[in-house]
Amino acid sequence: MFKNRLNSIVVKLGMAMVVLLFVVLFPLGYVVNQGFFAFYYQESLQALDRQSDKIIHIMVNSREMGMDNHLTMAMHMVDDGVMILDSERKMVIQKNVDLNPRILVKDQDWTQLRNGNSLTKQEGEQPGQWIIMAKPLILNQQFQGVVVMATTMDAIERSVSQVQHVLILSGVGALLLALGFTVLMVRKLSIPMLNMVGAAKAMAKGDLNVRVRVESNDEIGSLAQAINDLASDLKRFEDTRKEFFVNISHELRTPLTYIQGYVGLLEERSGSMEHIRIIKSETRRLKRLVDDLFDLSQLEEGKMALTLEWVDLPEVLQGALDSVSMRMKEKNISLVVEEEETPLLLLDGYRMQQVFINLLDNAIRYTKEGAISVITQRVDEEVHIRICDTGSGIPEEELPYIFERFHRVEKSRSRAFGGTGLGLAIVKKLVELQGGTISVQSKMEQGTGFRISFPIGKEERES
Amino acid sequence: MNYLVWAVAGSLIVAGLICLSMAPAAMADYPMGTFIHSFVVVCFWTAVPLLTLGFVYYVVTRKKN
């Protein structure tokens, strides 16, 4: 349970935010700390510089005026360490510094000072390290000695330490504040995702009526919408599948019942041609159903092998028309054929005939009276075949789904007309498998028209 | 969002504001006065970006609608 909670997106996002905060806060803290240290160091150096200048000024003036006691007074005003050395590096005055002058001002430093240059350096080891500023005392162009100002690093470190405490407190405060807002933000971000997880789990358990609330137009909103669409599609597919099983059971049972009944009759008395005709018809119907199922399963598994050859489409179409001509005559439907000269296409003739028979069969089935027109024409670099009827038409909202397997327009009427709900799915797959496209247009009570298009390739053009 | 999450988030935010307010008070001569003053100022500066964001969101949403 605890492990699952640790593995949740809320915890991961929260941890990522905290790590990001640390990534920002640690370097920032280091830089601020170093900045303060440098600032206090420079301030201390400047203070030593100012104080040493004052002492030199007092020494020069008091010597000229013969008032050495002024120097002693000035020394009392200085809080930092002071050491005044004569021209032989012997100590004249010392205050708050208990270091050996030769350690404080080494030989090379002394040479530098004798040449009239100032000196700044750190001496000793931490803790108790000194910052030293030494300046030469030059009177009447002659080197008279050195004023050495010294202060310990402790003062700087105390100030920096105080600042460090403030920084740490501020950092902890900022971290807690950011954590608080992170918890709210991460929770707000994760709620839609958790809802989607719940919806997906419900769908997996079979509840296809579940929907996710779409609260925004961003990526999460799109994902929620996609889940809703998926649930709708699955619901429709599930409904169609259930419908199909009801239909297929009925379709399989009806011919079997007929066959069983008439075989029984044939057993009882001598067979009549009418009984045999009915048995033959129902057997054909049953076979067609099983053939459709077989074809569709082959197409969906990609196992259907095509025999491609140079095909004259009008010729194939004529073959299909011959197959359905009897039924058209029975229903008194007239046929209009318009053919343009089209090039040969590399297709499977047998499967194309199956496509045309399926479409013509549908047209005949749903046309009570009127005509079926079959038009073949070349448009630009494509061959178009149109099969239009003047039948009952398909409702507009059903059009996007008619090529889906098991889908039937107006379920009850379809059963009365026959058909398995697989024909158009097979047609679409066969056409697409051969590089073509199929589209449909329909108006209620005016009729339906299917258009199959095949591109004319370079080889076809040359042929 | 359940109450536990609100409680945790609220506690963290209040603790953060207190820590931030204590920082200047730690160096001050009158810690309590400085703390209260800092607390008000820190709350103000925390609210400013939130209010700005809320205002921008409101304006953008109203324009879209």
Image (cartoon, grey):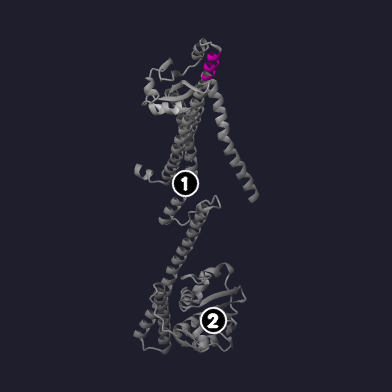
Where residue B38 appears, as percent x and y from the top left, is 55, 27
Relative to A34, is B64 above or below? below
Q: Residue furthest right?
A: B63
The answer to if A429 sits in the magenta stretch is no
Q: Circle 2 is placed at which residue position? A: A364
Residue B11 visible at all: no
Where residue A238 appears, as percent x and y from the top left, is 45, 63
Q: Which mark is residue A83?
A: none
Q: Main secondary structure of the magenta part?
A: helix
The answer to if A57 sits in the magenta stretch is yes
Highlighted range, magenta: A56-64
Q: Circle 1 is placed at which residue position? A: A190
- Residue at x 53%, y 72% (from the top left corner): A413
Going by the numbered disc 2, the residue's amino acid type is: Ile
Residue A66 visible at all: yes
Q: Residues within 10 Å of mark 1 (few under 14, many from 20)?
A: some
Disc 2: host chain: A
Q: Nearer the viewer, residue A295 or A15?
A: A15
- Marks 2 and 1: which is nearer the front? 1
Say which label, 2 or 1, has the lower sequence index: 1
Q: Nearer the viewer, residue A172 or A244?
A: A172
Regarding mark 2 in the picture, which secondary structure is present there? helix
Where residue A3 appears, as percent x and y from the top left, is 34, 44
Q: Judge left or right: residue A146 versus residue A339.
A: left
The image quadrant that residue A383 belongs to is bottom right
Where residue A82 appears, as percent x and y from the top left, is 45, 18
Disc 1: host chain: A
Going by the numbered disc 1, the residue's amino acid type is: Ser
Q: Nearer the viewer, residue A165 or A429?
A: A165
Regarding mark 1 in the picture, which secondary structure is present there? helix
